[in-house]
């Protein structure tokens, strides 16, 4: 039998809602300790910003990662654009980005995009080290996991390994312009929507591998034109080639813990 596998999208500082959702899926117990045995749990990034306790989310994920590994399971995490923003703010603050398009800085973007001073204050060397070494994309089973619904990842390489390696080199360095470029590219969205969405998704899957893309970053309710409180399930689209899992926690939607492979109910 396949190992039970779950994926969680953008938590954005809602630590307690995440714990409750994981408890409902029987992955953590009443004390927020791992009880998922050999299950595999993937996070698609955007742990921080907009909500009250981003570093609390990171702490929970880091602890569950250790506990799951001890239990024969696995907790893994990708970086979202908001982790790049958090780290960029931490490393570069209000240093101006070299640009022809007027003044810009991580500090300004961080503020505009829901950055929380408490999160910056709570960051430790352990958090920085852990975050800076997470991948941007990954595969689990037949799924290609990525935070953002964008093709911009291909700018860093032609394979999963190349993309993650390039990103990690950038994040290990101190070149503000290339850091900024990662933030900017990962903030784009909607590559798999519209008349050619299925075709675009199929091409990306052919190149990077996998049969279905699973992403966060773009709130499902925005894609469907309904209110986030109406969301109860992930969003399968682009001819079934793409699954969006961001329930829109920061705008009142649910924290979806999505079992993979996910199939819509009839
Ligand atoms: Mn995002």
Image (cartoon, rainbow, N blue to C red):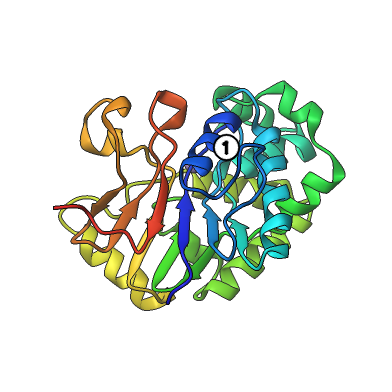
Specify the quadrant of the image occupied by residue 252. Answer: top left
Quadrant location, the N terminus: bottom left
Q: Residue at x 62, y 22 (%)?
A: 52
What x and y, as percent, mark residue 151?
41, 59
The residue beneath circle 1 is: 19
Instruction: Say left or right for 183 vs 170.
Output: left
State whether residue 208 is above or below residue 116.
below
Q: Residue at x 77, y 57 (%)?
A: 172
20 and 87: which is toward the camera: 20
Instruction: Say left or right for 209 vs 110.
Output: left
Q: Residue at x 59, y 49 (%)?
A: 181
Q: Secondary structure at mark 1?
A: helix
State whether residue 261 is above or below residue 159.
above
Q: Residue at x 59, y 75 (%)?
A: 161
Using the rendered image of the protein, determine whether residue 33 is visible from the camera's viewpoint: yes
257 and 226: which is toward the camera: 257
What x and y, as percent, mark residue 28?
59, 46
Across the whole image, how many numbered discs are drawn on residues?
Answer: 1
Q: Residues within 10 Å of mark 1 (few under 14, many from 20)?
A: many
What x and y, as percent, mark residue 18?
54, 37
């Amino acid at each position: 039998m396949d190992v039970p596998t779950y994926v969680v999208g953008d938590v954005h500082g809602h630590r307690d809602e995440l714990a409750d959702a994981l408890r409902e899926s029987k992955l953590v117990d009443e004390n927020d300790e791992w009880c998922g045995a050999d299950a595999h749990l993937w996070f698609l990034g955007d742990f921080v910003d907009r909500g009250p306790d981003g570093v609390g989310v990171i702490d929970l994920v880091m602890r569950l990662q250790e506990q799951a590994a001890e239990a024969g399971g696995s907790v893994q995490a990708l970086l979202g654009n908001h982790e790049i923003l958090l780290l960029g703010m931490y490393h570069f603050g209000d240093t101006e980005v070299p640009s022809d398009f007027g003044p810009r800085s991580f500090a300004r973007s961080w503020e505009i995009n829901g950055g929380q001073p408490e999160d910056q204050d709570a960051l430790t060397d352990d958090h920085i080290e852990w975050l800076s070494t997470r991948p941007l994309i990954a595969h689990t089973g037949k799924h290609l996991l990525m935070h953002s619904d964008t093709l911009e990842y291909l700018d860093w390489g032609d394979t999963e390994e190349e993309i993650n390696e390039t990103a990690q080199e950038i994040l290990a360095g101190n070149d503000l312009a290339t850091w900024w470029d990662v933030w900017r590219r990962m903030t784009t969205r909607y590559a798999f929507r519209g008349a050619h969405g299925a075709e675009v998704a199929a091409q990306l899957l052919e190149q990077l591998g996998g049969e279905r893309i699973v992403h966060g970053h773009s709130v499902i309710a925005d894609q469907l034109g309904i209110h986030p409180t109406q969301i109860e399930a992930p969003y399968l689209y682009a001819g079934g080639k793409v699954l969006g899992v961001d329930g829109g926690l920061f705008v009142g939607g649910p924290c979806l813990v999505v079992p993979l492979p996910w199939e819509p109910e009839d």
